[in-house]
Image (cartoon, coloured by chain):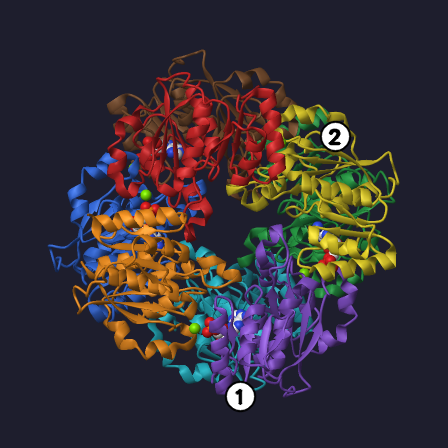
Chain colours: A yellow, B brown, C red, D blue, E orange, F cyan, G purple, H green
């Protein structure tokens, strides 16, 4: 297997039945299942076939099987979010990392409107081997964080906001233009992709 | 006169001759001239008619007549820029304010990629009665500054940047979405307009 | 507390339960609550926990506690709207201002299609210390108002309109390009932000 | 001939030679020539072949032959512009109308930033049989004028402005969304097309 | 009354009650009501108060009172649509014209994919005093019609289509760029506005 | 060789020297050269090395070697353009087809503003085995042509136009939305690509 | 009949009744019906009137009458899709082709993330007389396929994806810019149009 | 020093003199200079002050001082480009990496139009510790490469292309939507930023 992560189910656009059947087949072959962007009804269908399935509500993830202990407890990915509304994307990233055996430190709700909250946690920020930063609206947190660290930042624009946020486009542009360096960007709301990317970085 | 600022010449699209004639007429009527976005040739033509004309190269401003002493030296507008390329917009704002008799404190090149440069100047930032913040690329400086002050921030996106900066649109969206509150935005590169606005605020 | 306004609940994306719990906590700590963009069900949940809660239907605001008398009755913010459909944004701004102790004069439905309605109220318009102008569709009211006053105008584009209104983008661009000067712009439908900004201006 | 106007030369993208040859052929067949968006060099080439050719610098038009007296002197089209930079578009429209034998009244530089200039001319505005209104930046003049008259307004967005004017798009959207009614819009900077349209209206 | 049409109710965003109350007030004052973009429930509420109200389903119009006989039966506006899905916009325009006492000829479903349907009706097309042309998708009908007539065409882009139709933007751009001349454009789906404009043209 | 067309030089972004050297190498290997979007100086450099080189000014093509007689004279591609400004794109397509040995019939300047010019040539249009249709501005010619034929139409939007033509985007959208069926679209101004595609169709 | 395909019902925007009535009329006249983008309720209504109607769930097609045997079994169109979510568009294309008597080979879920799946099927890909390639998200499959074949590729962007996929725009741009040559593009999700186009190609 | 890379001069917008002075100061302090996006005249000015300065024409870089031997010769970053026009961006990335002491393997002109060129180099591609992939037009190379490796891909959209390439936006969207996973994106043409990012990855 190329990436060690390819067998993950992306739930949107799949019927409740399809989701459950794909999960069952995966479970029978590998003993583990991870499904992203799951709706509660999709979870119910999966649990009917696989009673040990767990629903991570905030992250909208279904998992079957253990989250392994970190392979390398000295290395961790810091997952930061700007506001409470960014938590689902942050948790999608954090749990995906832990599912892959990568240690995570969460720093949520540390947006730049209250800079001290971020600066109070500087050691955790600067000690990370890679960082996932999820932010919506204007996404300025990414630039500030990237200015504080020397490790790669994986930026995730979120669709949080209204009006001129344009469903995440404002945050996306902010992150692509980050003048701080050390920033690369994934698709809007793609916490899963950011986690896979950060996992590849820390397991170089 | 409604705003005290209406008699300002906007140079783009005016011929060298037109610019000089308009300046002369204004000079004869009021003894003072301010012209914005002036090209060097436009300045040459003005100086040929009005020898006391001064060219503020960086700000691309022509002035004739004194910059008055601040009417109220206790109040000042802080003009901040993120990077050196934002200086022309910052200077357009700063000189326009001083031309109107408003005291200015300049804090240039304090972008979020090096946060300490901003935090080192916190007393000046927090002591201002209004702030003009000019930034291009991702424009994150606005959100950070707005999170540190309780006074109104006039945000000026600049066309600095390339690619996904889209000529100032990325910075514009950042500023419109600023989650910090206390931010209102003027047109891209409109240092002049930001100055007029800040002047109205501090002269309430 | 930096701005005196930071403890306001933004309801969208929060569950009915979350909203009520956050409101309760805020109420117990400060005795006052303001929540914006509230749905009726969110209000029901809040009132179940805090019986004195009030729902301002038009403005979609929940408040608990008194609206204070104006601190400075000589100064007021004029809140103007162009059409009836802009009323919710106008009321969000007006009540937010009053909640902060700033006097408000409302001038609703004075769009430029019937210019006389605006000109009939010229003394109130020109007597204001700051103005909040909310308009959708083409947003021309802002330019006209800004041409009549010498005080700062806080422009709020609204998402009112259809087709080429593009959810408020047409009005946003109009306001950013206002040739009248003295205009700064907040995000689409952001009556709350406009109010906070105007409050800062008049309490300089 | 269907419209009486089809034999007009659009100069951009034509070489100096092509322009002159096409003009000569037209002249030999009809004794009259009108060419729009002409560069000075194109005019020089035309005049070399047709000495009676005239260059209308501001309007960027070349004409050969008489401008006829108005066929119907009681009817006129009012051509309004918002700012001095809109004059070329206004003149393109005005001269095209006069070339077709339609009487024109010009009201230039009557933008909404100084509303009184427009209101001072109300009788001319309200007496027109059709109106061409050219405006750039935010284009608000169209809505105000349309609110004052009961005759059709042909709106021409101009590319005047910078930043979020987006080369005329902001004005275009303003005009398409005009809440005043009685407005229809032609392409950005299309003074010629607006004139043809207004001519068709008054010659119903 | 300036336009004779200002007393028309625009239903979207109004509650069932509001709509009925506004209609009643209008009815009591003028004896006539026209309401556009009405939902069936809004009609039910109106009819409960005004039993003589009529619902024009296809056009989504509510009317109370007579449609007058054409004031000038020699003059008519041709209303053309490209496809069946454009009928609601076409009918909104046609009935609005008839409500104002202007004669209408309808030519529906004459899109350019079957050019003969249009060419078969050439006398009606070319005999009209003004034309309203509604088309979605690529909107090419406007250019073809404008090439066949010497009277003004009021173009209405519709939101019919999918994908790269972008909710009417493709048709809007087509119409603004019409190389045929004699075209001016109103907002997407704005059959009402097109009718008011055409009415002004034929009643010059 | 997969397509028989891969050895074509795309000139933009190549220096005069690079262009000439690449042409020479190609000439020495195959005895033939085709270069697209060539500037006059690039042609001069090529002719200095290959005296038999020919410059097709209108099409901006450089060729070395014979244009072969059509392989199948019974089959032809009709190349249509809407206006004179579309000729360069039309010629790029036509010559590229002839270079590949495909017979071409040219129908230029048959835009929908003068429909009769197109209808006069109906037999040539309807006799073609494939059609390339190049049009700028609103691009309506494609829909009309596609409604008249039962063979595939390769649509080429051109960047001809101004204002809301947006450099070819308006024509591109028109063509993608063509309600006539039988239309597929290539990139803006891509006459070369359209020719290759049409060549593949007729040589099935 | 010009195209042999014009009598196809496009269901969106038609009521259940309208759909059934149009289908019945078509059935009575021709004995065959094809309806695209049908909702289950629309199918129910059709089957109530025409019991032999069949619903192709995945393709969202209703058919009445036989799918003919391929007229020319030696020629086939390969229909490729990138991911499972693109299957509806692929099936719309494949069944439309078969309905017209064109042989189809399906290659589904061969996106570039697992290149070997595509390369494993190279003989089928390279043996096709035309190819329909449907892909969403970044749509890269089109470029890869076009690089492998010498026959025309009809590219269909799909609206599959989220965030910066912008409802199919990202895939549309990818396909329009395909550097591989031999690609022409239809509207987003337009499997039906792609099939008609490919049918025209192979039946040249 | 935080990143070891902060002392790099970005030349655009700096005068020839400014560039040379900044370079000199940097040289005197550190003995080394790297300047990006340099124009030939800027290089001349630098060399006048620092005779040992070298101009890397293709990469538009000025360097003073040695490129160090790779710190870790076992690890390398593969830099891939799709076409010759992408070489400047590729070289900017490659030289920036080598300047920082990271080993680079270059694979240029391996775009998906000729897939075999990429597949022929599979061992180098799959042996890399990180990859920088620069591509313009449709940018499909990124998705194909990411599907072949298990290491992080830093994607750089380039502004190569025309028409619907929109100056790099098409490639940017492609890369953000890459369905292959393991991709993160930097700004259009930002080879420098991609190099810094890849350097951080391999030096974890
Ligand atoms: N939330 C997500 N966002 C983006 N890609 C995902 C996500 N979840 C899963 N994937 C990818 O989608 C693939 C599965 O897609 P599918 O075969 O349609 O279920 C997985 O192998 C992952 O690489
Ligand atoms: N740099 C500037 N940006 C925006 N507006 C300006 C600028 N400079 C001057 N103005 C405004 O433009 C008006 C003069 O415009 P004009 O009559 O065209 O010269 C002045 O009254 C100012 O309000
Ligand atoms: N369908 C429509 N599209 C655009 N404007 C309309 C429409 N129907 C009515 N109007 C205008 O909207 C005004 C009424 O707006 P309101 O006061 O919000 O009901 C009328 O006077 C008309 O000018
Ligand atoms: N899925 C589809 N996408 C695009 N066009 C379609 C589709 N299905 C049918 N059509 C076309 O739409 C026409 C019927 O449109 P209508 O008369 O509105 O039912 C048919 O003749 C087809 O050319
Ligand atoms: Mg927060
Ligand atoms: Mg700096
Ligand atoms: Mg109103
Ligand atoms: Mg003016
Ligand atoms: Mg139809
Ligand atoms: Mg022509
Ligand atoms: Mg798949
Ligand atoms: Mg290449």
Q: Residues within 10 Å of mark 2 (few under 14, many from 20)?
A: many
- Please state the chain letter of the residue tagged with numbered disc 2 in the rendered image: A
Up-down relation of residue H197 to residue H19 (above or below): below
Q: Residue at x 39, y 16 (%)?
A: C72
Q: Looking at the rendering, in which quadrant would you find the N terminus of chain C?
A: top right
Which residue position holds label 2? A125
Specify whether H191 is left or right of E54.
Answer: right
User: Along the line of sight, which residue is nearer the eye, F150 or E107?
Assistant: E107
Q: Looking at the rendering, in which quadrant would you find the C terminus of chain C?
A: top left
**How many badges with numbers are in the image?**
2
Q: Position of residue D158 (x, y in %)?
A: 35, 48
Q: Residues within 10 Å of mark 1 (few under 14, many from 20)?
A: few
Which residue position holds label 1? F74
Q: Position of residue H139 (x, y in %)?
A: 65, 56
**What numbered label is drawn on residue E65?**
none
Helix, strand or loop at disc 2?
A: helix
Q: Residue at x 83, y 50 (%)?
A: A52
| Res. A11 image quadrant | bottom right
Q: Position of residue C20 (x, y in %)?
A: 60, 33
Up-down relation of residue F35 to residue B196 (above or below): below
- Please state the chain letter of the residue tagged with numbered disc 1 in the rendered image: F
């Amino acid at each position: 297997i190329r990436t060690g992560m390819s067998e993950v189910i992306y739930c949107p656009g799949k019927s409740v039945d399809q989701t459950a059947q794909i999960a069952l087949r995966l479970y029978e072959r590998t003993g583990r299942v991870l499904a992203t962007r799951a709706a509660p009804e999709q979870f119910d269908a999966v649990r009917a076939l696989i009673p040990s399935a767990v629903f991570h509500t905030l992250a909208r993830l279904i998992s079957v099987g253990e989250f392994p202990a970190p392979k390398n407890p000295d290395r961790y990915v810091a997952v930061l979010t700007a506001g409470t509304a960014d938590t689902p994307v942050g948790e999608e990233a954090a749990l995906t990392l832990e599912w892959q055996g990568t240690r995570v430190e969460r720093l949520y709700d540390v947006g730049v409107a209250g800079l001290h909250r971020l600066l109070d946690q500087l050691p955790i920020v600067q000690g990370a081997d890679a960082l996932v930063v999820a932010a919506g609206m204007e996404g300025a947190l990414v630039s500030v964080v990237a200015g504080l660290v020397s490790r790669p930042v994986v930026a995730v624009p979120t669709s949080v906001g209204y009006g001129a946020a344009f469903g995440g486009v404002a945050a996306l542009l902010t992150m692509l233009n980050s003048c701080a360096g050390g920033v690369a960007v994934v698709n809007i709301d793609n916490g899963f992709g950011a986690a896979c990317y950060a996992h590849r970085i820390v397991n170089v």
